[in-house]
Image (cartoon, grey):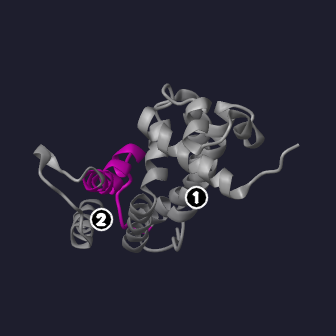
């Protein structure tokens, strides 16, 4: 049996994410991936059982990396402003530092099979910590109790919109755009004002 080559395995992961972002699930194949990596298709099967195993393995690894990054330095017992600021820092940091990984995971959201397996894993990692943070903020009288969807839209919707504009290099009406730290935290201050009790 042939042994695993770590460098080759990393190349396969990188090219697999690139291809999935570019061509989507339907346009992705083991043959195309092997060609892009300059390896035989048989080599891919050293690392993965099949196409689904390849996508799922890479996605779970990237999802775990994202969750770890999102929870870095985050204390669910912190006051609301401090905790939310850390979340914005972590989320924007992950997306700007690892754009391929972020777009790869986003691409998989549209597939039922992968959504169930991958996004359940993400929810299992983040839900308990974020729920505790939110419950504390409500109990401490810092924010009103809101439906989770409303809270999420107000708390993170503006952040993800800014990041999308930044990634695309343009904003509303095709205007050239690059996000700055000042814009990021200006938007954060508006979100905080909207959510915090006066």
Segment tinted magenta in the rendering: 140-166
Say which residue appears at 31% left-offset and 56% top-offset.
Answer: 163
Q: Is residue 181 above or below residue 3?
A: below
Find numbered disc 1 in the image and state the secondary structure of the residue it sits on: helix
Q: Which residue is mark 1?
A: 65
What quarter of the picture does the N terminus occupy? Answer: top right
Say which residue appears at 57% left-offset and 37% top-offset.
Answer: 35
What quarter of the picture does the C terminus occupy? Answer: bottom left
Badges 2 and 1: C-beta atoms under 8 Å apart? no
* x, y percent for residue 194: 24, 60
Find numbered disc 2 in the image and state the secondary structure of the residue it sits on: loop
Say which residue appears at 63% left-offset and 54% top-offset.
Answer: 10
Residue 196 in magenta? no
Residue 150 in magenta? yes
* x, y percent for residue 143: 35, 62
Query: Left or right: 77 with respect to 193?
Result: right
Q: Who comes first in sequence, dot 2 or dot 1?
A: 1
Q: Nearer the viewer, residue 181 or 86?
A: 181
* x, y percent for residue 104: 48, 44
Kindly report which numbered mark, 2 or 1, lies closer to the viewer in this rendering: 1
Q: Which residue is mark 2?
A: 196
Say which residue appears at 58% left-offset and 62% top-offset.
Answer: 68
Q: Nearer the viewer, residue 120 or 127?
A: 120
* x, y percent for residue 79: 43, 73
Q: Is residue 187 above or below residue 181?
A: above
* Disc 2 from disc 1: Cα separation: 30 Å
Q: Tag on residue 182?
A: none
- Number of numbered tags placed on the structure image: 2
Q: What secondary structure is the magenta-colored segment mainly? A: helix
Farthest top residue in view: 26
Image quadrant where residue 50 sits: top right
């Amino acid at each position: 049996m042939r042994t695993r080559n770590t460098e080759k395995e990393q190349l396969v992961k990188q090219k697999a994410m690139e291809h999935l972002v570019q061509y989507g699930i339907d346009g992705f194949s083991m043959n195309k991936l092997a060609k892009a990596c300059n390896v035989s298709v048989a080599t891919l099967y050293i690392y993965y059982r099949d196409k689904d195993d390849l996508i799922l393995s890479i996605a779970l690894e990237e999802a775990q990396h994202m969750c770890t990054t999102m929870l870095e330095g985050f204390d669910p017992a912190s006051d609301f402003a401090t905790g939310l600021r850390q979340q914005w820092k972590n989320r924007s940091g992950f997306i700007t530092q690892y754009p391929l990984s972020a777009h790869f995971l986003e691409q998989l959201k549209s597939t039922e099979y992968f959504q169930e397996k991958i996004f359940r894993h993400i929810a299992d990692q983040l839900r308990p910590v974020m729920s505790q943070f939110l419950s504390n903020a409500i109990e401490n009288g810092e924010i009103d109790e809101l439906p989770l969807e409303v809270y999420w839209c107000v708390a993170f919707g503006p952040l993800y919109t800014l990041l999308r504009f930044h990634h695309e290099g343009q904003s509303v009406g095709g205007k050239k755009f690059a996000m700055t730290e000042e814009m990021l935290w200006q938007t954060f201050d508006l979100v905080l004002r909207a959510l915090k009790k006066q």
